[in-house]
Image (cartoon, rainbow, N blue to C red):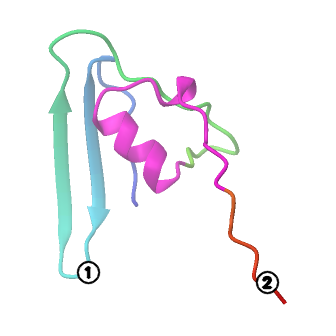
Amino acid sequence: MGPTRRRLPPYRLRLLFWDGSGMVLASKWLESGRFTWPPIRDGSIRLTREELALLVAGLDWTRVAKKHVKRPVRAA
């Protein structure tokens, strides 16, 4: 994922990224509320794929807890 502009109002989002064949500019405006941004660390923002999906959906990704999934154990 490429640079994200944070100079916009808190209800607008722009993403610029390379999709393998060219640059993509995506823009989104929320009708109500604001985007919940992660803190800036070392001059950049890092999001997982899931966190980005929640951010773009306009959801507060900080309030979503990761669910622990038990992995099956192989019987000997």
Q: CA distance from mark 2 to mark 1?
A: 43 Å
Numbered circle sitting on residue 20: 1
Mark 1 surroundings: few (<14), some (14-19) or many (≥20) residues within 10 A: few
The type of residue carrying mark 2 is Ala
Q: Residue at x 35, y 45 (%)?
A: 53
Q: Residue at x 68, y 40 (%)?
A: 41
Above or below: residue 58 compared with residue 42: above
Residue extending farthest top: 32
Q: Nearer the viewer, mark 2 or mark 1?
A: 2
Q: Which residues are magenta?
A: 47-69
Residue 62, magenta (yes or no): yes
Which part of the image, by quadrant, shows the N terminus?
A: bottom left
Q: Is residue 29 left or right of residue 61?
A: left
Disc 2 + disc 1, Cβ < 8 Å? no
Query: In this view of the protein, which residue sits in the foreground, 45 or 73?
Result: 73
Residue 36, magenta (yes or no): no
Residue 21 horizontal/vertical position (percent): 18, 81
Which mark is first along the chain, 1 or 2?
Answer: 1
Q: Residue at x 18, y 75 (%)?
A: 22
Above or below: residue 58 compared with residue 15: above
Numbered circle sitting on residue 75: 2
Q: Is residue 42 left or right of residue 48?
A: right
* Image quadrant assignment for residue 4: top left
Residue 66 horizontal/vertical position (percent): 61, 41
Which part of the image, by quadrant, shows the C terminus?
A: bottom right
